[in-house]
Image: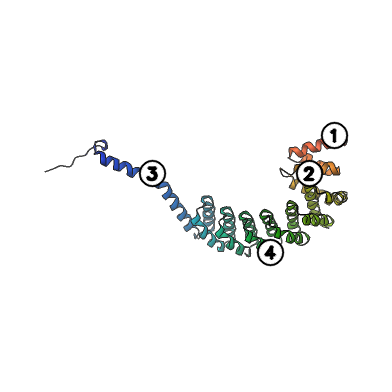
């Protein structure tokens, strides 16, 4: 009668040992992918969790993974009952940039919540699909009293760079929420389209000081020859509210890469307020230009 005996692994037959080694290798290679698959499936199921915070967490996690299987479930979540969930979904779909999300996002531009519409407009600007131009143009007339939907729609159109948007943006510069019009002015300035420049020059007579100041800064950055005389007139405005708005607009628009136009503007118009803003900015190029301007014009900067 044969008996069973225990043997150490190294004592087993070569074929059995090799088989074990192959199985272990397969497990090592397959496990991570399998785990990722399970993770995505688990997160997709989490999109129907009763707790909205858990749903939001799952959406962010799926956005980080960017697995194609998550796109349709995320699209479905654009109709979630919670506006924060819908807003998060729109943002994540904008990051994923899957073509399947374009039409659902266009539909979501009519969401009842303005913050959702605002986020949707931003997401469409990230995707940059030409089919979104007309819906985004329509969003320039959104009834959001804070102007943020219009602001993001203008920004999105600026990213897409479709010539169909020029005239609607010009119209939006004349009407609507003053906050949105400030952004529209910046977007039009970036196009450098002659029609846009003419519209911006005309807006230097705008009654709202914030819009007028932002338009002035946009034109300062563009350095279009046609704008020199109108700007010279506009910058002579001594109204305290306008001067304050001009300083704020200069600070807001003095991003890296815009320095050359702003420095030329300082030297051309010799405006002390502009020099003071540059000196107080965090931009080293503008600070240096202001210092040089002060030396040439007999000014010294006094710390208050």
Disc 3 from disc 4: Cα separation: 53 Å
Q: Please state, as top left, top right, bottom left or bottom right, where the C terminus lies in the image.
A: top right
Q: How would you rate the neighbour count of disc 1 (Cα within 10 Å): few for under 14, some for 14-19, many for 20 or more? A: few
Residue denoted by label 1: 295
Q: Please state, as top left, top right, bottom left or bottom right, where the N terminus lies in the image.
A: top left
Mark nearer the N terminus (2 vs 3): 3
Q: Give SS at disc 2.
A: helix
Residue found farthest to the left: 1
Q: How would you rate the neighbour count of disc 2 (Cα within 10 Å): few for under 14, some for 14-19, many for 20 or more? A: many
Disc 1 from disc 4: Cα separation: 50 Å
Residue 99 appears anywhere in the view: yes
User: Residue 298 at what x, y percent from top left?
Assistant: 88, 35
Q: Nearer the viewer, residue 253 or 53?
A: 253
Side of 124 where 7 appears, left or right? left
Q: At x 64% / y 55%, what residue is drawn?
A: 125
Mark nearer the N terminus (1 vs 4): 4
Disc 4 from disc 2: Cα separation: 33 Å
Residue denoted by label 2: 262
């Amino acid at each position: 009668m044969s008996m069973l005996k225990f043997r150490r692994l190294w004592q087993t037959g070569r074929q059995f040992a090799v088989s074990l080694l192959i199985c272990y290798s397969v497990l090592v290679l397959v496990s991570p992918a399998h785990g990722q698959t399970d993770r995505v499936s688990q997160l997709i199921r989490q999109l129907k969790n009763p707790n909205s915070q858990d749903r939001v967490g799952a959406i962010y996690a799926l956005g980080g993974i960017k697995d194609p299987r998550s796109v349709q479930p995320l699209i479905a979540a654009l109709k979630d009952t919670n506006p924060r969930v819908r807003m998060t979904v729109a943002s994540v779909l904008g990051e994923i940039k899957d073509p399947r999300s374009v039409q659902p996002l266009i539909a979501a531009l009519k969401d009842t919540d303005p913050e959702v519409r605002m986020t949707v407009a931003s997401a469409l600007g990230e995707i940059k699909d030409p089919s979104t131009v007309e819906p985004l143009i329509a969003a320039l007339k959104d009834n959001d009293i804070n102007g943020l939907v219009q602001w993001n729609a203008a920004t999105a159109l600026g990213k897409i760079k479709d010539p169909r948007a020029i005239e609607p943006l010009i119209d939006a510069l004349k009407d609507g929420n003053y906050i949105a019009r400030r952004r529209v002015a910046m977007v039009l300035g970036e196009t450098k389209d002659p029609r846009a420049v003419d519209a911006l020059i005309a807006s230097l007579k705008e009654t709202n000081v914030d819009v007028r100041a932002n338009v002035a800064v946009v034109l300062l950055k563009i350095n279009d020859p046609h704008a020199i005389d109108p700007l010279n007139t506009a910058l002579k405005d001594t109204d305290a509210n306008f001067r304050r708005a001009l300083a704020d607009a200069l600070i807001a628009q003095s991003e890296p890469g815009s320095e050359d136009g702003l420095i030329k503007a300082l030297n051309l118009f010799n405006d002390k307020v502009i020099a003071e803003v540059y000196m107080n900015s965090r931009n080293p190029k503008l600070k240096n230009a202001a210092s040089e301007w002060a030396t040439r014009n007999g000014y010294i900067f006094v710390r208050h």
